[in-house]
Image (spheres, grey):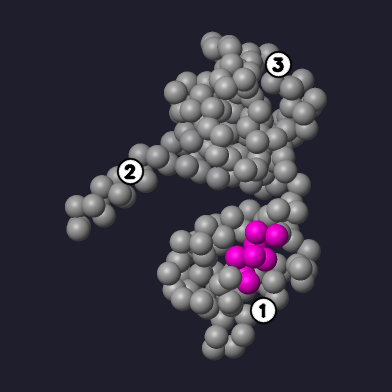
């Protein structure tokens, strides 16, 4: 059970903790220091986040990994599941729209200025319907898969229509209000990083 209210910022980091713990081979126990170092976060912040979810770890022992994973899964399970939309129905946008591996949020539609239709039964709608759709479905999460030159305008449109969290695939630094959460995905950088690591093997 959570020991303290979970802030929006803490909730945003919980999936990262869970993913790392599930893939970690560090044994049955793990320290906040190890988690912080692996995720490049401040140790104090990690301790505060984990304390809000499952209490403190044991001195010189750390957290039981199985218990911590269960606590994180429980916290995420009881978080309200929001619906998400995509703006940009090109190859990447339609691939994300058709992907059925997302647990939460569910991506329920995509929007585009030039393309309409559907993917796996999910609609691709014109941008003229964006505002009314977001209001009708209480959309809180937006995904940007448009070219660089359109990304900031799309971001501004999302923010103006009440979207509180944005997943951006356009390789550009977006200007957003403090209250909005931004997750930047740089596919080219990730691939370049893998290439570097592969050539070191």
**The C terminus sits in image quarter:** bottom left
Callout 1 crowding tier (Cα within 10 Å): few <14, some 14–19, many ≥20: some
> Magenta residues, as a range?
67-74
For marks 1 and 3, give the one nearer the viewer: 1
97 displayed left or right of 23: right
Residue found 76% across the figure and 47% down from its top: 80
Give the main secondary structure of the magenta stretch.
helix
> How far is the residue under mark 3 from the one under mark 2?
35 Å
Residue found 56% across the figure and 72% down from its top: 65
Residue 65 among magenta residues: no
Number of the label disc, if any, that sits on residue 129: 3
Q: Where is residue 146 in the image (x, y as percent from the top left)?
A: 50, 25
110 displayed left or right of 35: right
Q: Is label 3 in contact with label 2 (beta carbons under 8 Å)?
A: no
Closer to the N terminus: mark 3 or mark 2?
3
Q: In this view, does 60 lie above or below 170?
A: below
Number of the label disc, if any, that sits on residue 191: 2
């Amino acid at each position: 059970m959570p020991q303290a209210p979970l802030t929006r910022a803490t909730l945003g980091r919980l999936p990262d903790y869970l993913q790392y713990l599930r893939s970690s081979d560090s044994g049955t126990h793990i320290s906040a220091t190890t988690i912080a170092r692996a995720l490049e976060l401040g140790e104090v912040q990690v301790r505060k986040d984990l304390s809000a979810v499952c209490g403190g770890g044991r001195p010189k022992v750390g957290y039981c990994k199985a218990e911590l994973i269960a606590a994180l899964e429980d916290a995420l399970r009881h978080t309200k599941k929001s619906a998400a939309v995509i703006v940009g129905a090109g190859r990447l946008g339609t691939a994300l729209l058709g992907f059925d591996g997302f647990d939460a949020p569910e991506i329920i539609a995509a929007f585009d200025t030039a393309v309409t239709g559907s993917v796996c039964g999910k609609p691709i709608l014109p941008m003229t319907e964006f505002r009314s759709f977001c209001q009708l479905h209480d959309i809180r999460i937006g995904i940007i898969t448009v070219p660089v030159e359109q990304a900031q305008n799309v971001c501004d449109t999302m923010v103006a229509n009440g979207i509180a969290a944005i997943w951006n695939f356009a390789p550009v630094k977006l200007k957003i209000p403090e209250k909005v959460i931004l997750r930047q995905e740089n596919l080219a950088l990730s691939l370049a990083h893998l290439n570097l690591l592969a050539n070191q093997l």
